[in-house]
Image (spheres, helix red, strand yellow):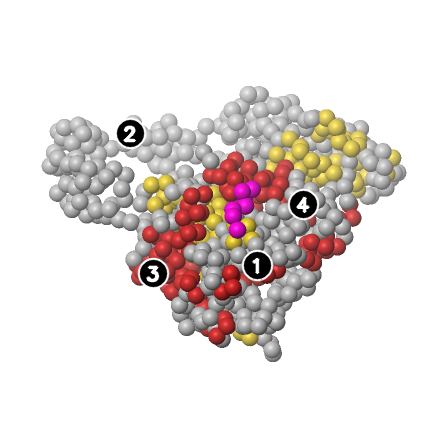
């Protein structure tokens, strides 16, 4: 039923029409093709290829094309004019096409959401004549078509006329008929199946109904007989005679006994997160430290260590040992006043071990912790528990994030059993590398903190049981593993589904936050991500979800990409197009080549669309787990990076952040800003930091007032 013409007829027509938007005449010198290389729900990348099939060079060329349902936004390697139709001609360097050779120019286009990429004809004096016309697009050319106005989608014969198949003559086409052998004269429904008689319209067919005269609208049992009146005074869906809490407020989530239940997190049909049945806007910030910090190798106390301690802005040396007086409660009061209602809390597997030496003890006495004694924790696990309880008391929801396979390896891990070499091994001027630690066997001289899927799933089960263990209802979700950039999509999809199963064994009321992957793995496997010119951030790539989706219930799943601007990593699509020598460069290599940074919203948003944005349009819940940056970059960052990018005018990362928040508002995407506390070296926080790597190195860990540029940005994001 899906074929409009027979195979023979199709072969004849393809011979006449050509394929893939190309058409070549033997009488002409060139073959001209429009070839789609990549597509995503709202756009595509294509190339137009001109191949000289003749025996003499082509000197100078010009071609034309037009789209029925698309537009071209950007082109390269040709002079392009016009607006659908478009005309392209040669540049100086590609004007000659030798016999047997080709010239290619590229374009990026937009199309209606989820429509197929266009297949078009490229014309021009060198390209050949137009193919035969087919006005109604039924696969039969107008010259042969005796039914020139065939409705779209109809099956036609070789003369172009609609064929209607209805074998059982019930008035429903065979392609729709789900009951193709209906007896003659039976009354059928829209899919061709016999409608059984139900005289009293109570939902029980007459042949079963023992009470065939049931009054309309009566509730009936399986035999069609009226039930006693069902009364539900508080409209909670539980009948009064079963309701143990008959005065439940409207909209309250209830158990089978009609009593309120707390801490039930779900995703509704529109992709909004709910708590106990009420939509919960996610206005979120990251508060880090418990996942492990990096001590310098020359530190007087705990050299090279990885203490697991929340940053609180109250270090032991402040004010000659008196501290600053800042507390967790003060910070919770202040961030709530700014609008934050959710905290993403990164931890490491070691955070869950109350005996781990990097999570306990004062640094000056042989331990690891540096907060003032008034805010110093007992151990990392207890600090996590106390923090969650205090957040619960303050009506702050928490997302617990397994940030790494080890507190010593941190953000660079990329997979459960990560091992060196790591991405920052040769980072210019960076002193906190971790080449001597691994989460699986890595050779002599490397300390191994073994981690694998079995340990990880046990950790997830433990976290899933925390709400019941400590008596809170604010653990909204579990971010199962941070920035799993070192996996293919197939491997990460399997792990994510296994994580859901493990969590669901313990807790059916918590959400599963799943991050994306990257553009390739450490062993050189390239991972599809759409247009190769827009490289995804670690954790950003959900491109393959569109053909191989996660098998996790949509009402429990939160898509949680990460994305950052140039202050974290200078991606290749940030490079100035006016500097061709910088094409394809990124990171330190781009900085050392004096490449300029240009924030092009059109290019960047197209990348976000195909990496993750299309899923929001499909109704998935989406919370960007990490975004943010240094508003003054390249100022106020590590000295080596300031020197490397000193040619760039400060403000480009702020421009990138504005572009992202604009995109988030357009798509109704929520997010967790990185970070609340200011000790992140490449981004800073929403609090300003007393520390400056050039002018004030003694005030590490001293928090100042809010950076109003950041809090204003977040208030704009959260504004209705």
What SS does tag 4 mark?
Answer: loop
Q: Residue at x 15, y 36 (%)?
A: 231
Residue to which mark 3 is pinned? 465
Q: Which portion, as a residue range, is magenta?
A: 704-710
Q: Tag 1's secondary structure? A: helix
Residue underneath mark 2: 186
> Do labels 2 and 4 touch, CB within 8 Å?
no
In the image, residue 567 lies at what x, y percent?
A: 63, 50
Q: Nearer the viewer, mark 2 or mark 1?
A: 1
At horizontal 66% and vertical 41% (from top left) the residue drawn is: 599
- Of pointers 3 and 2, the one earlier in the residue sequence: 2
Numbered circle sitting on residue 154: none
Other-residue count near label 2 (Cα within 10 Å), few / some / many at <14 / 14–19 / ≥20: few
Instruction: Tell me: 26 left or right of 603.
Output: right
Q: Nearer the viewer, residue 332 or 159?
A: 332
Q: Earlier in the sequence, mark 4 or mark 1?
A: 4
Q: Earlier in the sequence, mark 3 or mark 4?
A: 3
In the picture, the disc for residue 650 is: 4
Of the two numbered discs 1 and 3 on the same chain, state the one appearing first in sequence: 3
Q: Which mark is on residue 699?
A: 1
Residue 162 within the segment the image draws in magenta: no
- In the depicted structure, whether residue 651 falls above or below residue 201: below
Which of the 4 image quadrants contains residue 19? Answer: top right
Q: Position of residue 112 (x, y in %)?
A: 56, 32
- Relative to 473, is 711 on the left or the right? right
Say few, some or many: other residues with alpha carbon within 10 Å of mark 3 (under 14 / 14 to 19 / 20 or more).
some
Whether the residues at callouts 3 and 2 have beta carbons within 8 Å, the answer is: no
- Nearer-N-terminus badge (2/1): 2
Whichever of callouts 2 and 4 sits on the residue coming sooner in the sequence is: 2
Spatial CA span between label 3 and label 2: 57 Å
Mark 1–mark 3 CB contact (< 8 Å): no
């Amino acid at each position: 039923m899906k074929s409009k013409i027979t195979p023979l007829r199709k072969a004849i027509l393809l011979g006449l029409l050509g394929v893939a938007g190309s058409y070549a005449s033997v009488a002409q010198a060139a073959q001209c093709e429009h070839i789609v290389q990549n597509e995503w729900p709202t756009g595509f990348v294509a190339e137009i290829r001109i191949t000289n099939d003749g025996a003499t060079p082509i000197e100078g060329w010009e071609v034309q094309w037009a789209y029925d349902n698309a537009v071209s936004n950007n082109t390269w390697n040709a002079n392009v004019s016009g607006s659908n139709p478009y005309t392209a001609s040669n540049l100086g360097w590609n004007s000659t096409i030798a016999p047997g050779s080709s010239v290619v120019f590229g374009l990026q286009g937009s199309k209606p959401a989820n429509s197929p990429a266009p297949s078009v004809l490229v014309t021009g004096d060198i390209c050949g004549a137009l193919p035969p016309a087919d006005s109604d697009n039924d696969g039969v050319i107008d010259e042969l078509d005796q039914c020139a106005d065939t409705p779209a989608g109809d099956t036609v014969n070789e003369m172009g006329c609609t064929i209607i198949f209805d074998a059982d003559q019930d008035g429903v086409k065979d392609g729709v008929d789900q009951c193709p052998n209906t007896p003659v004269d039976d009354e059928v429904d829209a899919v061709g199946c016999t409608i059984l008689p139900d005289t009293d319209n109570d939902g029980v067919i007459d042949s079963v109904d023992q009470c065939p005269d049931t009054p309309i609208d009566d509730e009936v049992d399986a035999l069609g007989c009226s039930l006693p009146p069902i009364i539900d005074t508080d409209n909670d869906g539980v009948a009064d005679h079963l309701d143990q809490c008959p005065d439940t407020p409207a909209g309250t989530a209830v158990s089978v006994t009609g009593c309120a239940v707390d801490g039930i997190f779900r995703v509704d049909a529109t992709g909004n997160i709910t708590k106990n049945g009420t939509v919960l806007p996610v206005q979120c910030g990251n508060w880090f430290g418990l996942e492990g910090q990096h001590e310098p190798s020359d530190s007087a106390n705990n050299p090279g260590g990885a203490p697991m301690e929340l940053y609180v802005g109250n270090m032991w040396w402040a004010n000659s040992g008196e501290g600053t007086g800042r507390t967790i409660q003060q910070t919770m009061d202040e961030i709530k006043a700014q609008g934050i209602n959710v905290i993403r809390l990164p931890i490491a597997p070691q955070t869950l071990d109350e005996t781990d030496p990097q999570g306990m003890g004062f640094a000056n006495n042989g331990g690891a912790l540096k907060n003032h004694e008034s805010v110093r924790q007992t151990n990392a696990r207890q600090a996590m528990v106390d923090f969650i309880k205090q957040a619960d008391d303050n009506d702050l929801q928490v997302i617990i994030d397994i940030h790494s396979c080890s507190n010593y390896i941190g953000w660079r891990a990329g997979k459960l059993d990560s091992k060196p070499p790591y991405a920052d091994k040769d980072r210019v001027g960076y002193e906190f590398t971790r080449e001597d630690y691994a989460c699986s066997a890595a050779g002599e001289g490397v300390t191994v903190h073994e981690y694998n899927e079995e340990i990880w799933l046990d950790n997830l089960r433990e976290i899933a049981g925390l709400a019941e263990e400590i008596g809170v209802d604010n653990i909204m979700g579990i971010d199962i593993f941070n920035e799993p950039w070192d996996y293919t999509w197939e491997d990460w999809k399997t792990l994510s589904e296994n994580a859901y199963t493990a969590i669901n064994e313990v807790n059916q009321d918590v959400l599963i936050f799943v991050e994306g992957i990257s553009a390739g793995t450490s062993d050189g496997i390239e991972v599809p991500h759409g247009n190769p010119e827009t490289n995804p951030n670690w954790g950003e790539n959900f491109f393959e979800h569109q053909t191989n989706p996660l098998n996790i219930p949509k009402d429990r799943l939160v898509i949680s990409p990460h994305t950052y601007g140039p202050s974290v990593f200078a991606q290749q699509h940030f490079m100035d197009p006016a500097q061709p020598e910088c094409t394809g460069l990124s990171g330190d290599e781009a900085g050392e080549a004096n490449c300029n940074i240009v924030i092009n919203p059109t290019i960047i948003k197209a990348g976000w669309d195909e990496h993750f944005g299309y899923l929001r349009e499909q109704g998935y819940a989406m919370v960007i787990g990490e975004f943010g940056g240094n508003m003054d970059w390249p100022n106020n960052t590590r000295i080596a990076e300031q020197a490397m990018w000193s040619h760039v005018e400060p403000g480009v990362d702020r421009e990138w952040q504005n572009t992202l928040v604009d995109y988030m508002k357009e798509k109704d995407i929520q997010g967790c800003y990185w970070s609340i506390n200011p000790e992140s070296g490449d981004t800073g926080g929403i609090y300003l930091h007393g520390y400056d790597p050039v002018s004030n190195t003694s005030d590490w860990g001293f928090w100042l007032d809010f950076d109003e540029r950041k809090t204003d940005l977040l208030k704009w994001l959260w504004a209705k």
